[in-house]
């Protein structure tokens, strides 16, 4: 029942949010994910048939044993198991949780207000990835509006020359910026590209640039 917030770092949580909310698909957020809820989500039941309750308990024991789990799994019929899964909504007003809440709202608003992101079309999408560098570059556009997004899944920072569409691009977000409780953005706020440019991108982060003057997309 561990949530993402219990399994990965804050930087990786932000990266996951960027990948999901900036893709041309309808996102599915698990309740509380938008602010980094920490309460686990164990399986729980409220059955009145004692035979069924015991069958579920034994089934859970067998399932956990297959994972080589050494402890007794949470009792699915216990009220305490249910209570442990309750969301703590006030968390979204505190520290990193408030930042994640703000980040998710910013990205969701962008899906509505930036034409290149609002258009959920794979035909207006260009993607390149490097398994070795653990880098994904994504371009989306709608008419003259275009965005260029880089995702760094690596434990190390990326630094190097990349293909970058010609034109002047303005950085809209860098998840490693101090505003997002990151180590500090290293990406340029403005990119004046002739087709290639140098980019420095922090580990486990993403950055998006926008060029409203961009036209028909990649050839």
Image (spheres, rainbow, N blue to C red):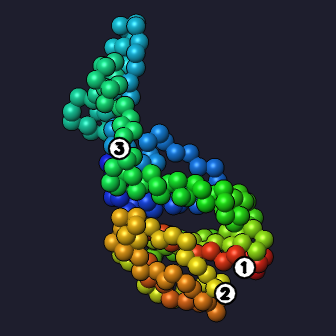
Q: Position of residue 176 (x, y in %)?
A: 40, 70
Mark 2–mark 1 contact, CB under 8 Å? Answer: yes
Q: Which residue is at a point 36% across and 74% down the rendered structure image?
A: 184
Mark 3–mark 1 contact, CB under 8 Å? Answer: no
183 vs 193, left or right, is left
* Label 2, label 1: how far apart the Cα atoms are: 7 Å
Q: Which residue is at a point 76% across and 74% down the rendered structure image?
A: 144
141 vs 88, left or right, is right
Q: Is residue 5 visible?
A: no
Residue 214's label in the rendered image is: 1
Other residues around mark 3 within 10 Å, as few (<14) / some (14–19) / many (≥20): some
Q: Nearer the viewer, mark 2 or mark 3?
A: 3
Residue 188's label in the rendered image is: none
Q: Nearer the viewer, mark 3 or mark 1?
A: 3
Which residue was labeled with disc 2?
A: 167
Along the line of sight, which residue is nearer the eye, 111 or 43? 111
Along the line of sight, which residue is nearer the eye, 198 or 108? 108
Residue 91's label in the rendered image is: 3
Question: Image quadrant of residue 186?
Answer: bottom left
Q: The C terminus appears in which quarter of the rendering?
A: bottom right
Q: Callout 2: helix, strand or loop?
A: strand
The earlier-in-sequence mark between 3 and 1 is 3
């Amino acid at each position: 029942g561990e949530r993402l917030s219990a399994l990965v770092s804050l930087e990786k949580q932000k990266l996951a949010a960027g990948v999901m909310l900036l893709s041309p698909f309808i996102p599915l957020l698990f309740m509380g994910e938008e602010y980094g809820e920490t309460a686990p989500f164990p399986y729980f039941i409220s059955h009145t048939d004692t035979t069924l309750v015991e069958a579920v308990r034994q089934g859970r024991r067998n399932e956990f044993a297959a994972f080589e789990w050494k402890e007794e799994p949470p009792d699915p019929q216990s009220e305490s198991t249910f209570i442990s899964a309750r969301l703590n909504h006030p968390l979204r007003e505190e520290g990193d949780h408030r930042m994640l809440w703000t980040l998710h709202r910013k990205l969701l608003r962008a899906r509505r207000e930036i034409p290149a992101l609002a258009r959920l079309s794979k035909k207006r999408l260009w993607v390149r990835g490097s398994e070795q560098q653990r880098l994904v570059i994504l371009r989306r556009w709608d008419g003259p509006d275009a965005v260029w997004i880089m995702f760094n899944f690596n434990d190390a920072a990326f630094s190097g020359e990349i293909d970058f569409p010609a034109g002047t691009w303005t950085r809209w977000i860098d998840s490693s910026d101090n505003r997002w409780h990151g180590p500090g953005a290293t990406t340029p706020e403005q990119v004046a590209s002739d087709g290639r440019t140098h980019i420095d991108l922090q580990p486990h982060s993403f950055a998006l640039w926008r060029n409203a003057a961009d036209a028909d997309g990649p050839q």
